[in-house]
Amino acid sequence: MVRAWAADPFVRHEGSTGGVLTALAGYLLDAGRVDFVLHVRASTTTPTFGERHLSFSQADVMEGAGSRYGPTAALLDVDEVLDRGRPFAFVGKPCDISALRNHARHDPRVDELVRYWLTPVCGGFMPPPSMDAFLRRIDVEPGSVTGFRYRGQGCPGPTRVEVGDDVRELHYLDLWGDDESMWKLPWRCKVCPDGIGEAADIAAADSWPGGSPTRGESEDDPGTNTVVVRTAAGLELLEAAVRDGALTVECDIGPAEMNEYQPHQVKKKQAVWARHQSIADEGRIVPATARLRLEELAATIPDEVNEAQRQGARDRIAQGKATEPRPDPDERP
């Protein structure tokens, strides 16, 4: 585990936090290690959403710089991507990484062609109704938005809303809330067993003590990622990127520092086993997991906390909050 950032000041500024994933994606292309990168960018039709994107150059990669917190189907046409028969890197959410890893059990081309697996540490995505509510709070009709950037161009950088020629820039905390009170998550993210990208070669995260930026410090924060290297391939890539001038590593860190930077991930990882038990209690299908240590981590917190998590999740299921409406493809969500 290290603290690091993109060596190129432009990439560091444009990307989320320190631009590490953006820098690594560009490096893989420039070094000829892959033919393209499968990742995401802002949707060209619904700006608060994301869409699958293939990058063949550093300029292509920069189109996807900065985080996307809206619904994004990164693997929408993965079979067609594999049909290209060309080596590539995949940058996706932890759940996307796991999905493609699982797909490798059914399609040997995945292990043959996906040379590098990169992910952000993920806190979940914002459901469309919550995004629409945010837009209306700032007097913007959701259907009128022509451009939207969640963050980037700073750390975290402004949240930028475009309605034609009208451009509004707000603080990142105006979207999520200074106390994260407006950070709404769908059920699937509340019961996610892996927000920290355990199936990736490299996972990159924010480095804000307490898990959230402050308004004052973010004015001139150049951005520093925490980076978790999980595989031998990831270690070789990190070392090569540093050696060849794509990344700058500041220092090593350990689990204690990561816990300080990602306290919400600690709490969720400890709570997920109880939440999964609530799903079983209600007779629903429980996600199958392997090697994620969920029961062991649940044992590190008091029994009454586990029971509160289990009962709270049962209540959500009983109230219908564990069911999401089927999207209408002919209407904007």
Image (spheres, helix red, strand yellow):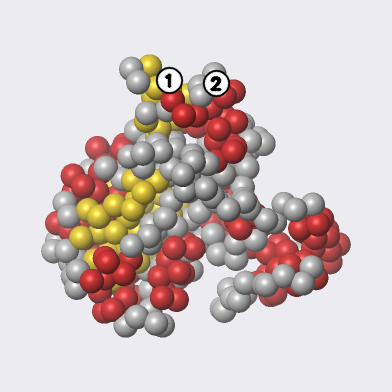
Pick the front one: 227 or 52: 52
Instruction: Report whether 66 appears left or right of 134.
Output: left
Confirm or deny contact between disc 2 and disc 1 (CB under 8 A): yes
- Give the residue drawn at x 61%, y 58%: 188
Dot 1 crowding, Cα within 10 Å, few <14, some 14–19, many 20+: few
Pick the front one: 184 or 49: 49
Dot 2 crowding, Cα within 10 Å, few <14, some 14–19, many 20+: few
User: Do we see residue 245 in this rendering?
Assistant: no
User: Do we see residue 225 in this rendering?
Assistant: yes
The answer to which image quadrant residue 100 occupies is bottom left
Q: Residue 138 bears which disc, if any?
A: 2
Instruction: Report whether 65 appears left or right of 8.
Output: right
Q: Position of residue 224 (x, y in %)?
A: 40, 45
From this view, report whether residue 18 is shown above or below residue 166.
Answer: below
- Give the residue drawn at x 48%, y 55%: 121
From this view, report whether residue 156 is shown above or below residue 120.
Answer: above
- Give the residue drawn at x 46%, y 29%: 143
Distance between mark 2 and mark 1 Cα atoms: 10 Å
Label 1 sits on residue: 168
- Give the residue drawn at x 29%, y 59%: 38
Check disc 2 and give the amino acid type.
Answer: Ile
The earlier-in-sequence mark between 2 and 1 is 2
Instruction: Report whether 185 appears left or right of 53.
Output: right
Q: Residue furthest front?
A: 330
Pick the front one: 156 or 39: 39
Q: Position of residue 185 (x, y in %)?
A: 61, 47
The answer to which image quadrant residue 138 occupies is top right
Q: Residue furthest right?
A: 304
Check disc 1 and give the amino acid type.
Answer: Arg
Q: Position of residue 233 (x, y in %)?
A: 31, 73
Q: Position of residue 192 (x, y in %)?
A: 60, 62
- Circle 2: element type: loop
